[in-house]
Image (cartoon, grey):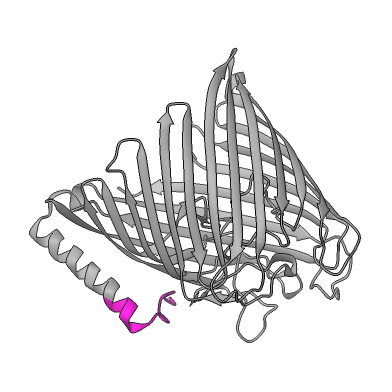
Amino acid sequence: MVHPFSSLKQSRMARMSALAVCAGFAAQTQAGGFFEDSSGSLESRTVYFNRDFRDGSSSSPQGASKRDETAQGFILNLQSGYTEGTVGFGLDALGMLGIKLDSSPANSNSGLLPSTGSDPRRSKDQYAKGGLTAKMRVSKTVLKYGTLLPDLPLLKYNDGRLLPNIFNGAMLESQEIKDLKFMASRLDRYTARDSTDSQDLRLNCKNKRYACNITADHFTMYGLDYKVNEQLTAQYHYAELQDIYRQQFIGLLAKQPMGPGVLAADVRLLKSDDSGSSRAGTIDNRAFGTLLSYSLGGHKFGAGWQTLNGKTSMPYMDGTNPYLVNYVQVNDFANAQERSWQLRYDYDFKAMGIDGLSFMTRYVNGDNIKVVGRNEEGKEWERDSELKYVVQSGLFKDVSVRFRNATYRTNYSKFARDVDETRLIVGYNLSIW
């Protein structure tokens, strides 16, 4: 197994080791809830991924015309409780294993598996990654250092393939004040979803919007979530990828009973600028999006609008998901000056007496895109569907089967490619204790 943090600086390893030793020592002297509140789970994922770029040529300058692979993944998640006392210590462990089931050189590089060093067209038979997280708790404040899976508006790890991206750094979360949550984080490395090696943080360069391989020493983030009442939550977050971009986010989450159903709103405003030495050049973007939905029985109807202003596309860190209402299965709709709208429908078949079965479909259309080197207006659209079933009883209870399909089309094929995509995911989460 190749450890993802083997290339970290010795000083970083020393800090992490020191925290781990402290946690272990405290556990021995004050066993308390360290073991009693611990948990362990093993998640299994079998993923079939097929992406057809619709250009009909394996010699396309943008790469092969098809990606088609199947792989098996396992995620072991062990979490301790905290030692007794005013200051509690704990230690978590995360281990991941990916195994190739089906792959060919002509259709590899799907994002499920890493390629071999000798031939980038061939996928490895298996790969593994993981790490430790030391944690400390005082009252309602928790500090973690080590391997992280952050799930915040401006720091949301990507989990769209076999194994998720993982990050290394520190994260603080505090809820000392009623209804107010404070978050802070500083990251210094990440391991891609189809990799075993930790690497420098970098700017995402989808469709060559920005130059690729623009790296940063660290990423910092601060955030406040305030629960105004049971129906309304207000958010403010700030983040900076050193010497590349800084980003501010304001959000509102609201829900209100209306007639026989519930009306919900998700409003997001992001402002992005270049920072420090501006290693990626000028960054100037303001993104506004809102998603409204109405739930009635098993039905949920949604409609969204998103508009981007400024000279450039919205920046975000590689390995994370951009916090946009129209970020969907294939595309992010985050191009410079793009306007996009979404229609969505969800149905929970529990309303018909079929527990565990659900369906989703949506359509997103974008236009007014400013494409570098072209005067013509860029346009794109995507249609997604998902059918999911979770077995409710019997030998295969809690096994989930999810079928996802997407169609994406664009008129600026020099940078983006038309896509027909199918994903089939069979999952099971086993609680070890």
Where residue 110 sits, quadrant-wise, is bottom right
Q: Is residue 8 above or below residue 271?
A: below
Residue at the (50%, 70%) spot, across then down? 191
Kindly identify the residue that appears in the image at 27 percent across and 50 percent down.
141
Q: Position of residue 269 (x, y in %)?
A: 60, 46
Residue 399 sits above or below residue 421 on the image: above
Q: Is residue 73 left or right of residue 70?
A: left
Relative to the observer, which residue lies in front, 23 or 404? 23
What is the magenta range? Answer: 1-14
> Is 299 in front, or is 99?
299
Q: Residue furthest top?
A: 259
In the rendered view of the protein, which quadrant contains the N terminus? Answer: bottom left
Please name the residue shown 74% across and 66% down the image. Answer: 207
Predominant secondary structure, magenta span: loop
Q: Nearer the viewer, residue 422 or 227?
A: 227
Which residue is rendered at x = 86% and y = 61% of the image?
A: 412
Left or right, residue 334 beside residue 194: right
In the depicted view, which residue is nearer to us: 307 or 77? Answer: 307
